[in-house]
Amino acid sequence: MASLLVRLNKMNSWLISITELMKLRDAKTLSNTFINSLTKTLDITKCLTIELSDSGRELIYQSENNDIFSWSVLDFDVPFSHVLQEGRYKLIPQSDLAYWQNNQDFKILISSLGNGETCLIYPLPCAKESSPSLIVIFGDAIKLEQVAVAPEFKLYIEAYATQWELLKDLKKVGLEKESLSETLTTERQVNQRGKKLLSLSTSLIGNSSAMLDVKKKIVVAAESPLSVMIHGETGTGKEVAAKAIHQISDYNKGQFVAINCSAIPENLLESELFGYEKGAFSGANSYHAGLIEQADGGSLFLDEIGDMPTHLQSKLLRVLETKSFRPLGGKKELTSNFRLISATHINLKEKVKSKEFRPDLYYRLMQCPILLPALKDRKEDLELLSEYFIDQYNESYQRDVGFLTKQSLEYLKKMDFSGNVRELKSMIELSCSQVEDGQPISLSYISDNSNALSLFDFNESVNYIGNLTEILDDFEFKVIQERLNKHSGNKTKAAKSLGIPLRTLTYKCQKLEIS
């Protein structure tokens, strides 16, 4: 009766341990609890688990000191491979221990065995063909022989194996879900980027490799709140690129506020940017919100920032760092959260070296640099750009100008376009104004206008021109004046050479005050 009670108490102790194992949801905690429980319950010297690698080709054991031991599953110089192959436990007799010491890692593993001790290697039972791991127990040889056949021990091992396999499967499912989630997120991001790239085709015209690279950089820039610096020659479309960044960014709910730092007198630029209170200076009759305040929640575009006065550079840097500013004459700080987009056609780094531009502001502005290619470096976009400008002209002026002839396009490809896209646009619009509805733009229009425009220093002149009408008037004035001089003032011949009716030329001469 006493023996039965002892056995029942022992079984009850095992059941309690099994219940504790079933509660655990972390594989490492499960393994540690299992080992500690065995060590304490069986009064053994040591217990450890040896696991199969993910590849299933190696057995791995990591010691408490983080030393790594490994054995090939096909290495039959160690007893582990025999246990895996046979699928049953192996109690190594003390007399056989010396036989297995040819393998250095195994020799180190059993080096702590004392007199009368040996090891029991037990495969974890599982539903899979090969055991996921082995249990190795060190202790008294006689005691281990009893443990190996004890039903309580076998039950405990099976409970541990079941829970261990469950946690491993749960982890695998979790990793698969995480991987699937990451894949879906990545696909969603790629899809969104693809849509954004597609949307840019309506504003940034061109499919050349240079323009595709620019569009990709614009999409990346739009996804972050970093300051963007757009660099490019005059006429490459820096403001167009800036607007594109704004339109596909999270700042598109706010305004796109732009200013050309070189077009505003130095004494007015500060009040335009920061605004002013009533009475701040002579003529300040009411409160005026500056561009920084207007750009709150949106984008502020500072074109030709290299021309910003030094004292304003320090103030701008403070705004970027603190998101706060003070209007001229103001007593309290205001806040504005905006994305800054800057642009320049000059080498700002040279200005930093010459101490004309603050280095701290320079690096703050250059968080996300984008270089726009010159038109001469993407001439494969000429046809697409020309068609776009013809369509724009027709829509703006309710016209029906035809296409660009092949000869005209070939002529354009030979030009260097020092004024870049802006020069091409002006040339196409000027040609459109001379062509009758339904007629294509032939070579004569393009070549004549090209020669006429060569008299016009494009890059130097555009700074003082305020709008498209003034640009066209200025071009037309020079073209008509040059053609009249060529034909000694004969309007009939000049009109014929320009491909326009005499009455149209007469009207334009009166309008442009050409004598």
Image (cartoon, rainbow, N blue to C red):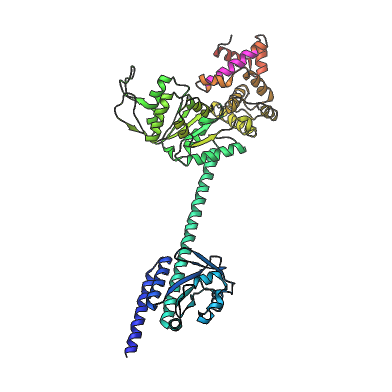
Q: Is residue 385 above or below residue 64?
A: above
The spot of residue 292 in percent (x, y) is: 39, 30
**Horizontal side, residue 459 vs residue 268: left or right:** right
- Magenta stretch encompasses residue 291: no
**Horizontal side, residue 481 vs residue 180: left or right:** right
Q: Quadrant of the C terminus?
A: top right
The spot of residue 120 in percent (x, y) is: 48, 78
Which residue reaches farthest left? 331
- Magenta stretch encompasses residue 477: yes
Q: Quadrant of the N terminus?
A: bottom left
- Along the line of sight, which residue is nearer the eye, 310 or 49? 49
Q: Can residue 285 be seen by looking at this rendering?
A: yes
Q: Is residue 279 above or below residue 224?
A: above
> From which residue to which does the magenta span run?
469-483
The spot of residue 399 in percent (x, y) is: 58, 27
- Along the line of sight, which residue is nearer the eye, 503 or 318? 318
- Along the line of sight, which residue is nearer the eye, 363 or 343? 363
The spot of residue 237 in percent (x, y) is: 54, 30
